[in-house]
Amino acid sequence: MKAMNEFSGRIRRCVDDYGMIEEGDRIAVGVSGGKDSLVLLCALRYLQGYYPKKFHLEGITLDLGFEGMDFTPVKELCRRWDIPYTVIKTDIKEIVFDVRKEENPCSLCSKMRRGGLNNAMLERGCNKLALGHHFDDAVETFLMSLFYEGRVSCFKPMTWMSRAGVWQIRPMLYSGEQRIANLAEHYRLPIVENPCPQDKSSKRHEVKELIKTLSLKYPDLKSKVFGAMQRLPLEGWAPVKKS
């Protein structure tokens, strides 16, 4: 458990810096089946065992309607970890790709998934939704906003969703994608492959490849961008508690 102990320490530092977890919180993890959400679920379950503020944890999966996505192994993982787990069937894939035939489907899909998760967690009495966004996601989103929209912007570590009356939290912002991938492989987590046709052709993928190329010459590029986001700071990015 050494690897998970070290990783959960990073989770705890992020949680503490931004005040993400309070006593009695009921936290739902949006489990897509990918490595990020599965590692987050397991890390929060591990954190739950020693964190001074007691919180409830459960997993919620929205089945988007793509063929071949079997969440049975995820269900078994949650059973072993004693985590309540729910899979909700949706028609998001049909609406986005078949009915609407969206040219840029990611935005609509994201909104529909977020709305579905908010509704599901409220039905289960949860007040916070934990999302698997990590260090690399934050840097990529910042640069996407700059390149494609001409804005200095990014999602926040904590976001109040006023319409739903719930908080979104992102406890993995201090953890890089490669570290997460290594942990998923180490624990042989049951990753469910995403068959979405946009998975490797999105603007995010373009920016990811650009960062990879630039990092060959500027190896600390991502760290500098992330640090700038906290030091500016972007709205919501100044740590509540200094590490």
Image (cartoon, rainbow, N blue to C red):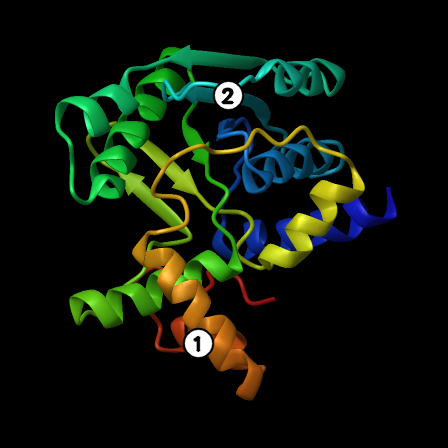
Q: Which mark is residue 225?
A: 1
In the picture shown, does residue 213 fall above or below 133? below
Quadrant of the frame with the C terminus: bottom right
In the picture shown, does residue 192 fall above or below 63? below
Residue 59 can be seen in this image: yes
Secondary structure of residue under mark 1:
helix
Q: Residue 134 or 147: which is nearer the viewer?
A: 147
Q: Earlier in the sequence, mark 1 or mark 2?
A: 2
Q: Kindly identify the residue that appears in the image at 15 percent across and 31 percent down.
A: 101
Q: Kindly identify the residue that appears in the image at 47 percent across and 81 percent down.
A: 214
Image position, residue 231 (x, y; %): 41, 77
In the visual, does 59 lie left or right of 129? right
- The number of callouts visible is 2
In the picture shown, does residue 114 fall above or below 213? above
In the picture shown, does residue 151 fall above or below 9? below
Q: CA distance from mark 1 to mark 2?
A: 35 Å
Q: Residue 96 or 152: which is nearer the viewer?
A: 96
- Taking the view exactly as shown, the residue that stands out farthest to the bottom is 217
Image position, residue 22 (x, y; %): 52, 37
Q: Kindly identify the residue that appears in the image at 54 percent across and 47 percent down.
A: 171
The disc labelled 2 sits on which kind of residue? Answer: Met
- Taking the view exactly as shown, the residue that stands out farthest to the left is 100
Quadrant of the frame with the N terminus: top right
The disc labelled 1 sits on which kind of residue? Answer: Val
Answer with the quarter of the image where residue 160 lies: top left
Residue 152 can be seen in this image: no
Secondary structure of residue under mark 2:
loop
Q: Which mark is residue 69?
A: 2
Q: Which mark is residue 1?
A: none
